[in-house]
Image (cartoon, grey):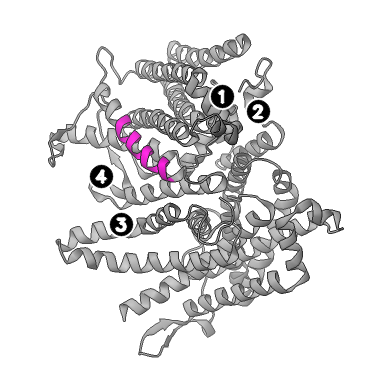
Amino acid sequence: MRRVAILNATVFAALVAVALVAHLAGAPYVVTLATKAAIFALAGVGLNLALGYGGMVSFGHAVFFGIGGYVTGIFASHAAAGTPVLTFPFTVAGSAEMLGLWPMAMVVTALAALVIGALSLRTSGVYFIMVTLAFAQMVYYFAISWRAYGGEDGLSFYVRNSFPGLNTFAPLQFFAIAAGLLALAMGFSALVTRSRFGLALQAARANRQRVMASGIRPFALQLTAFVLSAVIVGLAGSLYADLNRFVSPAMLSWHMSGEIMVFVILGGVGRLAGPVAGAGVFILLEQVLGGVSEYWQALLGLLLLAIVLYAPGGILGLLPGGRRHV
Amino acid sequence: MLLAEQALNGLQYGMMLFLMAAGLTLVFGVMGLINLAHGSLYMLGAFACAWVAAATGSFALGLAASLAAAAAAGVLVEVAVIRRLYARDHLEQVLATFALILVFSEGTRWVFGSFPLYLTLPAALSGAVTLPGGLQYPLFRLAIIGVGAAVAVGLWLLIARTRLGIRIRAGEADREMVAALGVDIARLYTLVFALGAALAGLAGALVGTIQSVQVGMGEPVLILAFVVIVIGGIGSIKGALVAALLVGLTDALGKALLPALFARFMEVSAANGIGAALGSMLIYILMAGVLIWRPQGLYGARG
């Protein structure tokens, strides 16, 4: 257990170190890349809760990433225009404060996850994979045809939302926000998985019948984990919207769902720091391979194949001390 | 009249979805494999057809090429990658086939570039025919409906009436037993995979004449094919046919009728917007409805 904790801390520290060194070396672009990695890792930590610990292979988590992003984009653009988001049944004003936007994004994501999860969890196995994918596509097509918020072209907002006491436009300060939330989410995830709830959830993944026989309803456990997982992904979506000051249906696309899944699996499923390592390596590959060939995704595909076929434990599974602990 | 035309469009769309879904559901039913790269085989078929048809000027040769290319790619992928995934869990299958999509898409982009190709119809199949009732309808779309129906009958005959079909059904039921009886199960699996791939390639080639042929064309269709087999019940070819037609008709009629329906009680531009948005979501709503009612799909045996 200690070795795993050290490994988790090391992976997180490496990400922070990259951002700090890049900042000192005067390379703000690299700081922004580290921020992107932290945000993707946050999404991965969220998905890991459902996928790694809960055994729910959701292929539609982009929907929560996108909803988090759209809530942020919509409130920010209304705040910039000085118009209310809603006038009926009650008036809701726009906002450009991260501390107001995050809870909003998380609540809306939670509601969406409650509906999607309750329906999808009626199925299992392959059905679950396809159904979560289909629900994400449904929202994707809705976003494309919703012209009030940019439709296919997406929605830009020009000012990054603010955080008290920080200048969110300074790359390192924005990184600090993303990394801070990532650390919180990792801590939360560690607490959840060690709680009675988390243990029952993992037991339900391992042996559904026995959990039912001991008087626990797996459905309630899984739905709760699904919603928690979605909320973290929604928060990541909100940060990602702020990173780009732009949201578009691409955030909801099934490629995004696949990528979030890749962060988790590249790093190692069901490991706390797996998504952090996975997202970091993904961004690194994008930069390195992207410089080699514009068809870098083909190389990424081959690498992924190799990992799935020959190293099912992901990157962390290859490291000493990286033995799977769930 | 508009309604009849939209119904035919829905039927044609449904038949095309059936060609895709049949392969997916067969591969899942027999091998227990979820194959995201099925859409890549569809794309490959379309590219092979467009390329050969442009080089030789013969659409028939193009069609043959699409079948051959998709089947060959299917065999190659099955032997090199897919075969190692049968015993793995679905998560790993999803990931590995997602990786295959990346390889196929970028590989195709590398070979053919990012610009779409276009397929021209042979003279014999272009133009419109007048149906009973005076409706003018493109001949080629009717031909797609015919091909779909022929494939449905052919698949049924293959599965229900031939020795290969018996083996496929037996492999579905009990893999070890069939292997113990002396059937080369590895070859059977390769064959089934190639069959599914060829059907996807055929669908791609046929649709390539209606839409442009480009990288990424397989993905929306793949997801709809998933919706189809979830509605129909995974592993059931009959379910795939019924669900494909249901999805095709729902989509075409929904997109045509909903804006008109909403226009009755709101202004036209708003009605068009909401109607179009709802129309594109309708098949997913249909799927959610079926899942609430029958989580295993219309003809599915397992949950």
Q: Chain of mark 4?
A: A
Name the main secondary structure of what is drawn in magenta: helix
Checking the image for residue A149, the label placed there is 4
Q: Residue flagged by tag 3: what amino acid is it?
A: Leu
Circle 3 residue: B278
- Residue B270 magenta-highlighted: no
Disc 2 chain ID: A
Q: Earlier in the sequence, mark 4 or mark 1?
A: 4
Q: Is residue A146 above or below residue A33?
A: below
- On whether disc 4 and disc 1 are found on a single subunit, the reply is yes
A136 vs A306, nearest the viewer? A136
Work out whether mark 2 precedes mark 1 in sequence or the reverse, and give the earlier one: 1
Residue at 44% across, 38% down: A61
Do marks 4 and 2 both belong to one polypeptide chain?
yes
Which numbered disc, 4 or 2, marks the residue closer to the eye?
2
Q: CA distance from mark 2 to mark 3?
A: 42 Å
SS assignment at label 4: helix
Q: Which mark is residue A274?
A: 1
Residue A147 percent coordinates (x, y): 25, 50
Distance Cα–Cα, label 4 vs label 2: 41 Å
Quadrant of the frame with the N terminus of chain B: bottom left
| Amino acid type at mark 1 | Gly
Q: Which residue is mark 2?
A: A313
Q: Give the CA separation, mark 4 to mark 1.
A: 35 Å
Judged from the image, the secondary structure of the residue bearing numbered disc 1 is helix
The answer as to whether the residues below labels 2 and 1 share one chain is: yes
State how far apart marks 1 and 3 are (Cα).
39 Å
Residue B223: tell me if it is visible.
yes
Question: Answer yes or no: do the residues labelled 3 and 4 have beta carbons within 8 Å?
Answer: no
Magenta-highlighted residues: A106-119
Where disc 2 sits, the SS reads: loop
Q: Nearer the viewer, mark 4 or mark 1?
A: 1
